[in-house]
Amino acid sequence: MSEAHAPAPYDKDILMAIRALIAGKANEGQQQTAMDWIIQQASNLYDVSYRKQDSHATAFAEGRRFVGNQIVKMTRPEALKAVEGNGPKPVRGKRQTND
């Protein structure tokens, strides 16, 4: 478990992949490298958010994870259905019903 506020590690390959992605010129490998780094390292999606005896660090870690969750959510079929109008649109804080 890393410190919540610690920058995600990267090397030159990741740096160049991110730059190419932002410029719209990334090849397939660079796209995969960039998104993998964003989801697994920058957002720390698969890390535990809880930081013992430090609620601020826990909140910071949860904020990072939220970004990764939003990106991964867009890969799910339900997200496409929702934006196409073929499925229920999620309502924040409310349980979905089939009324």
Image (spheres, rainbow, N blue to C red):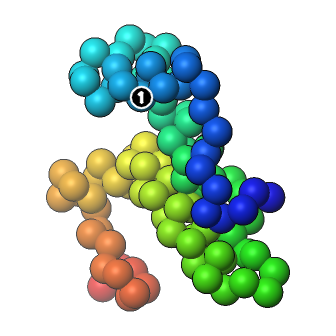
Q: How busy is the neighbourhood of tag 1: few (under 14 within 10 Å), some, or many (20 plus)? A: many
The picture places residue 25, in percent across and down from the top left corner, at: 28, 15
The picture places residue 29, in percent across and down from the top left corner, at: 49, 14
Compared to residue 99, the image places residue 17 above or below, namely above
Q: Which residue is mark 1?
A: 18
SS of the residue at dot 1?
helix
Compared to residue 1, the image places residue 54 above or below, namely below
Q: In this view of the protein, which residue sits in the foreground, 46 or 91?
A: 46
> Which residue does the image show at 56% across and 61% down from the upper left?
65
Amino acid type assigned to the residue bearing label 1 in the image: Ile
Q: In this view of the protein, which residue sits in the foreground, 77 or 60?
A: 60
> Which residue does the image show at 69% across and 69% down from the upper left?
49
The picture places residue 54, in percent across and down from the top left corner, at: 72, 84
The picture places residue 85, in percent across and down from the top left corner, at: 18, 58
- Give the number of callouts: 1
Using residue 47 as the reference point, say whether residue 27 is left or right of it: left
